[in-house]
Image (spheres, helix red, strand yellow):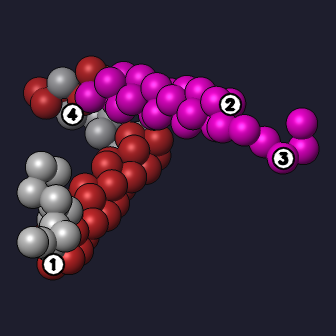
Amino acid sequence: MTTRDTGHASSPPVSFRVVLRLLAAVVWTVLGLLAYFVCQGMFGGYRQMHSQLLTTLGMIAIALTGGIAWIVDERRPHDDE
């Protein structure tokens, strides 16, 4: 008789989780750099690349990210309340 429950999926291996975390860190770093470049106006002068649209979409993404972070923080229980 085994004590292992075969009805539940086992957690992924440690190496797979490490790769996922590294991939997530790289993706978040690239998105953060893109947000920085948008805020600095680095895409501001290229009409042939529709840079004004890229800048507008970047600023909307930055605002939405801040809004989502605020909502998640408001839903967490706070010790000072």
Task: Depth check: give the residue in front, 24 or 60.
Answer: 24
Q: What's the CA distance linking mark 1 and mark 2? A: 34 Å
Q: Residue at x 9, y 57 (%)?
A: 6
**Residue that numbered label 4 is attached to:** 46
**Residue that numbered label 3 is attached to:** 79
Q: Determine contact: label 3, label 4, CB under 8 Å.
A: no
Q: Is residue 73 above or below residue 7?
A: above
The quadrant in which residue 2 appears is: bottom left
Task: Depth check: give the residue in front, 51 or 73.
Answer: 73
Drawn side of residue 68 relative to residue 27, left or right: right
Q: Is residue 39 above or below residue 15?
A: above
Q: How many marks?
A: 4
Secondary structure found at label 3: loop
Q: Amino acid at mark 4?
A: Tyr
Q: Determine contact: label 1, label 3, CB under 8 Å.
A: no
Magenta segment main secondary structure = helix
Magenta residues, as a range?
A: 54-81
**Residue that numbered label 2 is attached to:** 74
Q: Amino acid at mark 1?
A: Ser
Which of labels 4 and 1 is toward the front? 1
